[in-house]
Amino acid sequence: MRLAKTIFFFSASLLFYSCEKVIDIKVKESDTKYVIEGIITNEPGCKVYITRTKPFNEDNDFSNVSGATVKVKDNNIEHMLTESSPGVYETTLINGAPGHLYQLAVTINNQVFTAVCTMPQPVVMDTLYISPGPFGEFKFATVSFKDPVGIKNGYRFVQYKNAVKDPMIFWENDEFTDGQELVVQLDTGIDEKDDPRAINSGDEVTVEMLCLDEAIYKYWYSLRSGGGDGTSNTAAPANPLTNITGGALGYFSAHTINRKTVIAP
C-alpha cells in the first residue's frame, strides 16, 4: 500500500521562474501482528486476550481475534480455554498457585505461539494510605511492604480511583533494596487540580500489588520506558520485551495479587 504526500516547493531562480514539484513518497507499511495477553493469578480462573494490530494509517483500536486454539498447562496438566466472547479465551479450572510452572500454547491459522511463566511467591502490602506529594499540592496512594531477603523480586501496582483504573504503569524491584521495608508512592504525574485522575477527599482508592517473575517485570519496565503508557520522552516508542515466542506481541503472566482499599482523607 502506498501513502502519497504532496509537498510544494517554491523557489525563485535567476530568471525569477517559479515551479511546483509533486513528490510521491512511498511508505512501507508495517506488518500487522497478533497481540496475546495471558493472565493467571493466585485467584480462580485464567484468561487470554487475543487481538491483532492494524496498519499505521488506521485507527488505534485493535481487532479481536476469534477461532484460536488456546491451551494452558498447569504443572503439565493441560486445560483447553473456551472463547467466551470475541478474542477472549478463559477457563475456571485453573486456580494459580505460587511455584507452579505454566505453559501457554496459542494456535492461529497454523501459526503457533508459546510462552512459559512461573508464579512467584507472594509478597503482600502491609499498609495502603494517601499521602501528599513532594510539594503538598496533590495526594497520591502510598504502599508499604517488607521485601523478602535474598530473593530477586519485581512488583507492579495497579491503582483504581472510584473503580476507574489509572492508566499509569507503576513498577518497583529490589535491586538496591533487598530485604528492606519499602515505601512506594504511586505518583501519577498529574499537574492540574481539575485532572479527573486526581485524588480528592472522599475518593475510594484501591491498589493491587502484583508479584512478577523476571520476564514479566522486564515487559512492564520496557513498556513504560519505551513510551507505552505515554509518559516517556521516547520519540518512537518501541515494542516492549515479551516472553512469547513465535512473533506475537504481548505477554503471558502468572503472578500473585493482593489488594487494599482506603478512603482518601
Image (cartoon, grey):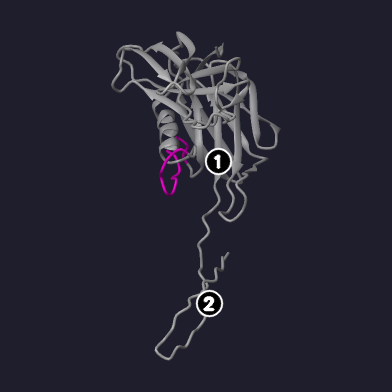
Q: Which residue range is magenta in the image? A: 231-245
Where residue 232 appears, as percent x and y from the top left, is: 43, 40
Residue at the image position 41 percent from the left and 43 percent from the top: 233
Q: Secondary structure at mark 1?
A: strand
> Which residue in the structure is indicated by mark 2?
22
Q: Is residue 61 above or below residue 75?
A: below
Q: Is residue 195 above or below residue 161?
A: below
Where residue 243 appears, as percent x and y from the top left, is: 44, 35
Name which residue type carries label 2.
Answer: Val
Q: Is residue 90 left or right of residue 242?
A: right
Q: Secondary structure at mark 2?
A: loop
Name which residue type carries label 1.
Answer: Val
- Quarter holding the N terminus? bottom right
Mark number, residue 35: 1
Q: Callout 2: few (<14), some (14-19), or many (20+) C-alpha neighbours within 10 Å? A: few
Q: How many marks?
A: 2
Where residue 214 appears, as percent x and y from the top left, is: 39, 27
| Separation of residues labelled 1 and 2 (CA atoms) | 38 Å
Q: Is residue 241 left or right of residue 107?
A: left
Q: Earlier in the sequence, mark 1 or mark 2?
A: 2
Residue at the image position 41 percent from the left and 86 percent from the top: 13
Question: Marks 1 and 2: which is nearer the front?
Answer: 2
